[in-house]
Amino acid sequence: MNKFSSILNKTKEIENFRVFDVDDEWDLFKPLIHQEITSTSDLLDNNLDNFNKETSRQVVFLLSFAASLILIFAFLSFFSSTQKVVDSLTTDSGPNSIRLIDGSLVLLLPHSKLDYYISLNHAQERSLHLKGDAEFDISASILPLKVYHDSILVEVLGTKFSIKKVNDSIEIINNSGSVKVSEINNAENARILKKGDTFYYSNGKFINPADSLFKPKSDIEPSPEKVKKTKPAEEVTQGSVYLLKSVIKNHILKYNKKKIKLEKKIKLDDNARVRLDLSKSYLNILEDLKKQGFIDFKKGDCPDCIIITSPNKN
């Protein structure tokens, strides 16, 4: 090293050289680095503390806001779920009327009950549930009105009609507009009532006597000549008087085309009048006609098929 220094000292170009010791220089530089690192670390720590404090405040605020929203929605949901949207009216010995919120008027007849709507918010229809008898004057609306009564459903937009229980059948009278009547459990079994139509429902059948049968204005008993020719009918005491040919053609055959048929050689009295309760089943009606001596019947080819024949003279 001394020899190397001697050579350097003799050389004019580098006579002012200074020996540079790397280890010494590094030892001098290390404190500066440590000081800078410490300063930077402290600055980062301070910023991180400030950031954590600010972030914590924001998180707490957001959580509080979310909790408030949850409480508000829970309260609104509870309030809306407990809000009453249906009320009921019951009558005893006298009638009572009620005007609904849409302007419709219902006259509830004695010994009846009506469940009716008191709010139509978010409703898709106007629903009424009737037990007993009532008369309706329904205001026009974009929402259809549906009256549920026993096993039938009456649908209207705006009309006047009534529903009454008559013996074992339900009577529907339409006074204006049009009404659709169907079974609740069988929507395909439906009828459209026009103004002035009257339908009876019993045993899954809708009957319109005015359209399908000739019904005399008064109950006229068969003439004495007919009474002598017919068998006693002590059990047939209810119902109204109809023409025999109308009952068979426009009622029995019309609604049982595939199951009930006339025998080709049958001979019936076209002018004969019969007393019947058309709310009964078709088989019971045939039994009543047979008891009165107007017809006879036998089994057809299929298990449920019936062929109407001429009365047995014996």
Image (cartoon, rainbow, N blue to C red):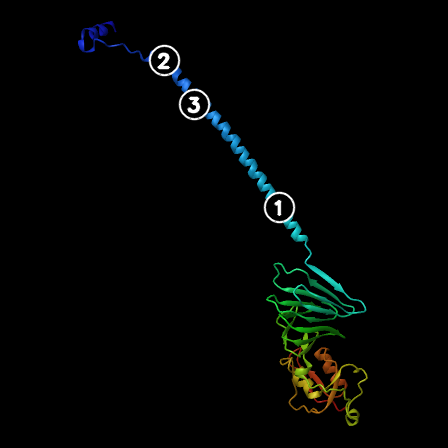
Cβ–Cβ under 8 Å for marks 1 and 2: no
Q: Earlier in the sequence, mark 2 or mark 3?
A: 2
Secondary structure beneath dot 1 equals helix
Q: Earlier in the sequence, mark 1 or mark 2?
A: 2
Q: Nearer the viewer, mark 2 or mark 3?
A: 3
Residue 283 makes an appearance in the image = yes
Depth check, front residue: 192 or 201: 192
| Residue under numbered circle 2 | 28
Residue 201 sits in quarter: bottom right
The amino acid type of the residue labelled 1 equals: Ile
| Residue under numbered circle 3 | 40
Depth check, front residue: 61 or 103: 103
Residue 173 image position (x, y, % from top left)? 69, 76
Depth check, front residue: 16 or 232: 16
Residue 132 image position (x, y, % from top left)? 75, 69
| Residue under numbered circle 1 | 72
Depth check, front residue: 312 or 21: 21
The amino acid type of the residue labelled 3 equals: Thr
Disc 1/disc 2 C-alpha distance (Å): 67 Å
**Disc 1 packing (10 Å; few <14; some 14–19; many ≥20):** few
**Which quarter shows the N terminus?**
top left
Residue 134 image position (x, y, % from top left)? 73, 70
Q: Earlier in the sequence, mark 1 or mark 3?
A: 3
Residue at image position (62%, 64%) is 125
Left or right of residue 314: residue 36 = left
